[in-house]
């Protein structure tokens, strides 16, 4: 065997190995399209509308700080698709909610939630008398609406229910109701005016 041929033959596998190392396999990372990203955001927005029916555009935009224009576009998109609708009073409801009756207690409880939305890890509607429950800093908070005249009913319901261990924020129609509540776990009271401004109170001892 010729020496130059033998050397070339022996070098061929080494050259192939070096070439392989110099050209690693390229990985293609899939990029989500604009439609896919908007689809996810629209689904999340529809979830909020379904949990808290009757919220205004202003409230829904507050769930996404700094993305107000995007949220307004998504609301229009959901209405055009027939997945949500806006009533004459300005509240948004999911498709199929033919009655479209606004729960004023829920709407006001949502204003309270929005005061904590930047720190809320999870939030959801709940059962009477709790309107909304949310987690913040690993702790459970419950927003309870106690309409005027329902003080005894709400207190009885919460004394009889299993203690969730959560901190209870009691939304009242008037601060004069505050002395009438005697159930455990109360962390504070609040009222919400027609403009969505929340005022907080502590029970005097």
Image (cartoon, grey):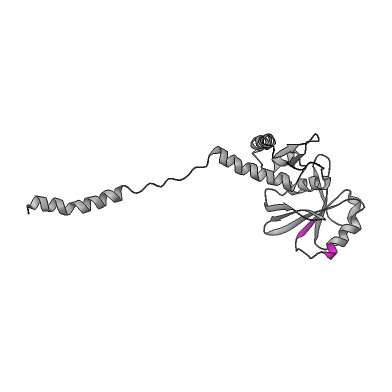
Q: Is residue 37 above or below residue 126?
A: above
Span shown in magenta: 158-168
Between 62 and 105, the one nearer to me in the picture: 105
Residue 35 vs residue 123: left or right? left
Q: In the rendered view of the protein, which quadrant contains the N terminus?
A: bottom left
The number of callouts visible is 0
Percent across and percent down for residue 174 are 89, 48
Residue 52 vs residue 156: left or right? left
Percent across and percent down for residue 60 are 71, 41
Between 9 and 117, the one nearer to me in the picture: 9
Q: Residue at x 77, y 45 (%)?
A: 111
Q: Residue at x 83, y 40 (%)?
A: 194
Whether residue 180 is visible here, answered yes or no, is no
Q: Residue at x 53, y 39 (%)?
A: 33
Residue 1 vs residue 76: left or right? left
**Residue 166 part of the magenta segment:** yes
Q: Quadrant of residue 77?
A: top right
Q: Quadrant of residue 168?
A: bottom right
Q: Is residue 160 above or below residue 143?
A: below
Percent across and percent down for residue 85 are 73, 37
Between 103 and 205, the one nearer to me in the picture: 103
Residue 193 vs residue 25: left or right? right
Percent across and percent down for residue 187 are 79, 58
**Residue 187 part of the magenta segment:** no
Q: In the rendered view of the protein, which quadrant contains the C terminus?
A: bottom right
């Amino acid at each position: 065997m010729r020496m130059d041929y033998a050397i070339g033959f022996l070098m061929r596998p080494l050259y192939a190995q070096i070439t392989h190392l110099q050209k690693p396999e390229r990985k293609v990372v899939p990029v989500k399209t604009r439609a896919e990203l908007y689809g996810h955001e629209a689904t999340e927005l529809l979830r909020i509308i379904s949990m808290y029916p009757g919220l205004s555009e202003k409230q829904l935009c507050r769930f996404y700080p700094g993305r107000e224009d995007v949220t307004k576009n998504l609301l229009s998109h959901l209405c055009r698709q027939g997945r949500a609708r806006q009533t004459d009073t300005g509240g948004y409801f999911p498709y199929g909610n033919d009655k479209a009756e606004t729960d004023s207690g829920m709407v006001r409880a949502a204003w309270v939630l929005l005061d904590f939305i930047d720190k809320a890890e999870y939030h959801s509607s709940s059962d009477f008398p709790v309107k909304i429950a949310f987690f913040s800093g690993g702790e459970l908070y419950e927003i309870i609406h106690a309409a005027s005249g329902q003080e005894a009913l709400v207190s009885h319901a919460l004394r009889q229910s299993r203690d969730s261990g959560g901190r209870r924020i009691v939304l009242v129609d008037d601060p004069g109701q505050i002395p009438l509540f005697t159930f455990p776990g109360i962390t504070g009271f609040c009222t919400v005016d027609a403009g969505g401004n929340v005022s907080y109170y502590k029970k005097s001892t």
